Amino acid sequence: MTDRPEPQRPPTGPSDHGPELAGRIGAKAARKLRARRDADRGVWFGLGMMGLIGWSVAVPTLLGAALGMWLDKAHPGGRHWTLALLVAGLVIGCANAWHWVAKEGRAIQEEQHHDDP
């Protein structure tokens, strides 16, 4: 009879791991199910987002240029509105694109934060 401590046995059942393991497994399973559900969203979603961002820059830029050309024809004089409104449209379009990208980034971060225990 020695006073040597008994070696601890490794956990063998689910009750030995506790609720934190179950939570991690549940989060991973939910993430896998969502990835399978949104599998077709990958490439096409990315291309669609690039198109949306492109159009959100192009449309205000072209509208600014068109309005500037109309103003230059309607009110000839020393001021040239085409370049000024083209730049203004470009700035508005870039701000719009920044808004979309930031919104998607926040949604992705929120989803990741929600998934992680």
Image (cartoon, rainbow, N blue to C red):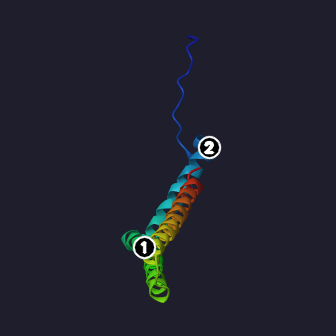
Helix, strand, or loop for circle 1?
Answer: helix
Helix, strand, or loop for circle 2?
Answer: loop
Residue 106 lies, in percent from the top left, at 56, 59
Q: Name the residue beneath numbered marker 1.
A: 83
Outermost residue to the top = 2
Which is more toward the observer, 47 or 29? 47
Which three-letter amino acid code belongs to the residue tagged 1? Leu
Which is more toward the observer, 72 or 104? 72
* Residues at marks 2 and 1 touching, judged by CB atoms closer than 8 Å: no
Frontmost of labels 2 and 1 is 1
Q: Residue at x 48, y 71 (%)?
A: 93
User: From the image, which quarter does the N terminus lie in?
Assistant: top right
Q: Residue at x 56, y 10 (%)?
A: 2
Residue 19 lies, in percent from the top left, at 63, 47
Which three-letter amino acid code belongs to the residue tagged 2? Gly
- The label on residue 18 is 2
In three-dimensional space, the C-alpha distance between marks 2 and 1, rounded to whole angstroms, equals 66 Å
